[in-house]
């Protein structure tokens, strides 16, 4: 079983000003976002990553590069950023570029909160279609990395908040209508391993903590009854 580390891009200028950027071009990380992405890269520096797949939007590519910059010495061969449009932001249609405070007054807002599976953004994408394309892409890449590098392979997918929330909902066996219960902060790390019988979710929305256990861990497809012994304690200098 390969392991995918799902990373949301760092904070952007649009996030800071309360705008729904959507797929607009030219939306970059602000300084806080760059610092967040660098910190995430430092967490992953102890993990040999076999590949990085990113949404094509600038904020995700910037985040992916900051992570790769800290991978020096952990991999046997250089890792490139593979862009996949199936991991791009939801097409919010006419909502794109508007402020969240303004959108909260729309009738559709409450439906997005309570029944997202029925939402089609005006002039844009259905949230159910968003989930279907992103989950299919993650599972496809995961199978490819495992076939090439073996079941211990660890790879990174850099994407967007609603995309990662929908992927996690699928891995948790949750209906899309419940995905608003999941939080995915800027530059946060969530970890999923797809087994032959079920996905296993190892973490969601973390922004701190040791990840060295990913480098040499061996996992069974079976869930440990009683919770198991957990990961080994991180090595201390």
Image: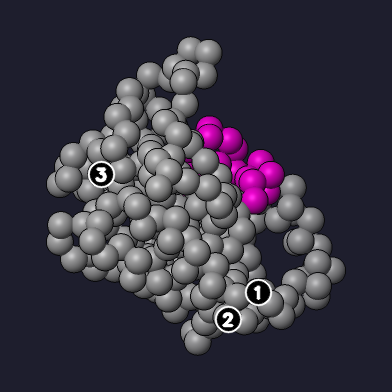
Is 167 inside the magenta-drawn segment?
Answer: yes
Indicate which disc, 3 or 1, sits on the residue closer to the N terminus: 1
Q: Secondary structure at mark 3?
A: loop
User: Percent from the top left, x then y, of residue 6?
Assistant: 45, 53
Q: Residues within 10 Å of mark 1 (few under 14, many from 20)?
A: some
Mark 2 vs mark 3: which is more N-terminal?
2
Q: Secondary structure at mark 2?
A: loop
Q: Nearer the viewer, residue 161 or 80?
A: 80
Question: Is residue 62 visible in this depiction of the protein?
Answer: yes
For disc 2, the neighbor class at 10 Å (few under 14, some 14 to 19, many from 20) is some
Pointer 1 with pointer 2, Cβ within 8 A: yes
Residue 228 vs residue 70: left or right? right
Q: Which residue is mark 3?
A: 153
Residues at marks 2 and 3, CA–CA distance in whole angstroms: 32 Å
Counting from the top left corner in percent of width and height, residue 43 is at 44, 56
State the separation of the CA atoms marked 1 and 2.
9 Å
Residue 124 can be seen, yes or no: no
Q: Residue at x 52, y 82 (%)?
A: 28
Q: Residues within 10 Å of mark 3 (few under 14, many from 20)?
A: many
| Residue found farthest to the front | 237
In the picture of the structure, the residue carrying the numbered disc 2 is: 30
Number of numbered discs overlaid on the protein picture? 3
- Residue 71 — which label? none
């Amino acid at each position: 079983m390969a392991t995918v580390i799902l990373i949301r891009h760092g904070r952007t200028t649009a996030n800071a000003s309360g705008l729904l950027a959507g797929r607009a071009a030219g939306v970059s990380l602000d300084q806080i976002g760059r610092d967040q992405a660098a910190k995430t890269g430092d967490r992953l520096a102890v993990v040999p990553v076999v590949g990085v797949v990113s949404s094509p939007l600038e904020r995700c590519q910037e985040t992916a590069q900051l992570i790769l910059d800290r991978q020096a010495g952990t991999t046997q061969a250089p890792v490139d950023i593979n862009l996949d449009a199936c991991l791009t932001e939801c097409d919010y249609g006419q909502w794109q570029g508007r402020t969240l405070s303004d959108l909260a007054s729309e009738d559709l807002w409450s439906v997005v909160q309570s029944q997202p599976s029925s939402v089609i953004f005006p002039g844009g994408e259905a949230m159910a279609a968003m989930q279907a394309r992103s989950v299919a892409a993650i599972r496809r890449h995961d199978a490819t990395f495992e076939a090439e590098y073996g079941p211990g392979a660890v790879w990174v997918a850099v994407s967007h908040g609603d995309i990662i929330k929908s992927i996690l909902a699928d891995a948790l066996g949750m209906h899309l209508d419940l995905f608003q219960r999941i939080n995915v902060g800027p530059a946060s790390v969530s970890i999923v391993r797809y087994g032959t019988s079920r996905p296993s979710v190892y973490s969601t929305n973390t922004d701190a903590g040791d990840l060295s256990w990913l480098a040499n861990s061996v996992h069974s497809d079976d869930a440990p009854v009683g919770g198991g012994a957990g990961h080994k304690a991180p090595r201390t200098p």
